[in-house]
Image (spheres, rainbow, N blue to C red):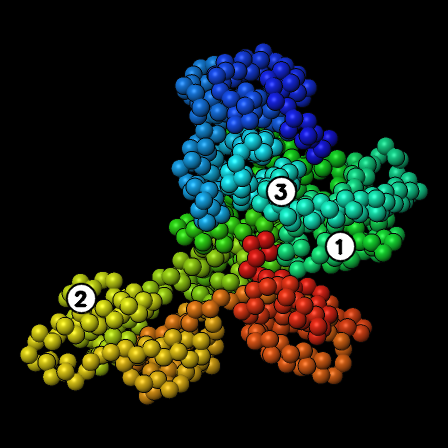
Amino acid sequence: MPPSQLDIDLIRNIHDVDSATTYLFDQVPPSQILNKALSFSKESHKCQVRKSGEPYVVHPILVAAIVVSITSDESMAISALLHDVVEDTDVSIEEIAEHFGKDVAHLVAGLTKIDSLRDNELVPSSSNERLILSALTFRKMLLASIKDVRVLVVKLCDRFHNMLTLDALKPDKQKRISEETLVVYAPIAHRLGISFLKNILEDLSFGYLFPKEKQKIDTYLQENYYAIETKLNEIKASLSDLLVKNGFFEEDFEILSRIKHKYSIYLKMQRKGVSIDEILDLLAVRIITKEPVECYTILGLVHLNFRPLASRFKDYISIAKDNGYQTIHTTVFYNTAIFEVQIRTFEMHKTAELGVAAHWKYKSGGNNVKLDWLDGLQYHNESAEEFYDLIKNDLYSEDISVFSPTGDVFTLPRGAVALDFAYAVHTAVGNRAMSSLVNKNKSSLLTELNNGDIVKILTGESDIPRCSWLNAVKTSKAKTNMRIICNARIKEINSKIAINIIATVMNLNHSRVQEWLESHNCNNYINIVDDVDHLKNLIGKYTKDIGKNSRFKSFVARHRFKLKKFTMAGLEIYSSTHISDVVFDYCCHPKSGDEVMGFLDKSKVHVHHKMCKNALVKINNYEPMVFIKWAQRKIYRYKLIASLHNEKGALADFLSYLVKLDIDINSIELGKNAGDYTKFCELEFETKEADINAFRAKIDSKIKVIDLVQTNDAYKN
């Protein structure tokens, strides 16, 4: 059985070399090469101690013990014993290779490289940018270690033991390391499918980063311990009786029970704005059997005897996740409680707990582990903020599997749309996608895909910029490539807008402005579209320059070119003439936050999206333009599912109430999963309200809220 029940307290309380050595050889029989590596590590670290005062070598010995509990790969165990030797002592990689072979030296070199990257990239713990820089460190680690995934597995075990001994450090160090663990190492464990390590790392970090929140959850679980245990034991006994009555022998299956791990509980509470006793799948049971076909027999028995929640059923056996994970998930009611039931074989259980570490077949340093998913993590030259925004979708979303018409399987995050699928097929397919067929029905490229959908993409002959769709796609590959096309297109448009703005302010012909900019090497003039100070400086420079020419002195005297600021309709407008009104043109429906531009018509400003085709005609005709930008205000995006009573005027009444709350509705869907008496109204909207709990209370006072989440949450569903 996988080490999901590692004796954490025992490992945490080992502080001497003899106890650590005993524990190591309790996990794996001693061999000549392992003993040699142990002696080498002891000798190399003999003068070193940890912050706690214990001999340093205790740490690598226990890391090796954790490694061998995961895999029988001897090179990994030896590299764990030696992982700090090169970094902390005078021993070289060449000496490691001489004593233990090239494979071990290769692993130790990879581990040393990760440490070097960490030291170079992480900012001091006092910085408020730790989270973003840790995300960047993760990117570099991933790229540095991609040649051999074993390096990452050993590093995860190293971090696991470090987290167990964090009490010896100062609070600021504890927080820094915990934050790094939560953002960098736990997601790697998740992606590699090593769920037991992911859960342990998250819970250990949670305790240091959010001690009050963890204490509340601990208190709840302690106070409700007997009630929870009673519920779990009851459903386990009921399931066991059900299986035995239907032909299963007791030795053919095992039923495990669990409570969702603490950090996962916390995230659920944050995402949904609920208390711990409102979490639906807090309790879970896992039925483990011998053969895959038996999983489906058990599923049938469970659904026939317990009422299932149909919307929460997932079959990852027939369509496995990229990292090899296979399990049937379903959720059922039992005696007024709700339980998640997972069904898998013993072999699937091993893979689910250990991920890529479950099945090693190494020859000459190669491996048979499927790592195709790494190709989908396309992070090029984004800023730190953009990179972190991308990885949160790739690393924290549940997966769905969809098919091409030829039967090829593509794994996408839940919520992915047809355009995400197009980019998963090939970058060129995504760039040139025109429309899609989902299950043979013509569909928009923004159609959300479901497990098992068959998708075909219809393409054109050239790349199509879709800048307003960046928030609609879910995968980093789609976002990155769409952004590349859009940035090039917007740069071209901005250069024309800049010339039109200067020409309008100074009442000059655009060709004269362009000629002056080129003759004075003003290559960065395009920046005036986003920077009003740069616009003012450039106009001042131009005015001073043409004022030197006697022919223009009278012109300059008549036109002072002073920009005035006007604020209206959520926009800041800078113009040398009076502005009386702002009109958002219907042809492109620009909304808050979009890339926009403004055309001057007498004293009115007509606002268009920068990708608007009608506006492009106006730009090319050199119509007068003014500098505009969105007035700064923090916007929060929410997704709401509410229970709407099926009575006349209910929807109109509810929407009128939302208008009073000053929200901007982006989309609305009515009748999804409709019942006999109640319909579910699903809304996506923007608001300045940041406090999700306070906001939920306001809406709850008017209508029953089923679900409310902030869709710009890093751990979004």
The amino acid sitting under disc 1 is Asp
Q: For the residues marked 1 and 3, what is the alpha-carbon distance in whole angstroms?
A: 20 Å
Q: Residue furthest left?
A: 550
Q: Quadrant of the C terminus?
A: bottom right
Between circles 1 and 3, the one closer to the viewer is 3
Which residue corresponds to the image point at 47% horizontal and 21% vertical from the top-left? 85
Q: Quadrant of the N terminus?
A: top right
x and y, in percent, of residue 79 in the image: 52, 23
Residue indicated by mark 1: 277
Which residue corresponds to the image point at 44% horizontal and 81% vertical from the top-left? 585
Q: Is residue 556 visible?
A: yes
Residue indicated by mark 3: 207
Q: For the residues marked 1 and 2, what is the alpha-carbon distance in whole angstroms?
A: 67 Å
Nearer to us in this view, 156 or 482: 156
Position above or below: 534 against 220: below
Q: For the residues marked 2 and 3, what is the alpha-carbon distance in whole angstroms?
A: 60 Å
Nearer to us in this view, 215 or 237: 215
Whichever of labels 2 and 3 marks the residue nearer the N terminus, that label is 3
x and y, in percent, of residue 33 in the image: 56, 14
The amino acid sitting under disc 2 is Glu
Task: Kindly state the secondary structure of the residue where label 1 is placed.
Answer: helix
Q: Residue furthest bottom?
A: 602
Nearer to us in this view, 265 or 217: 217
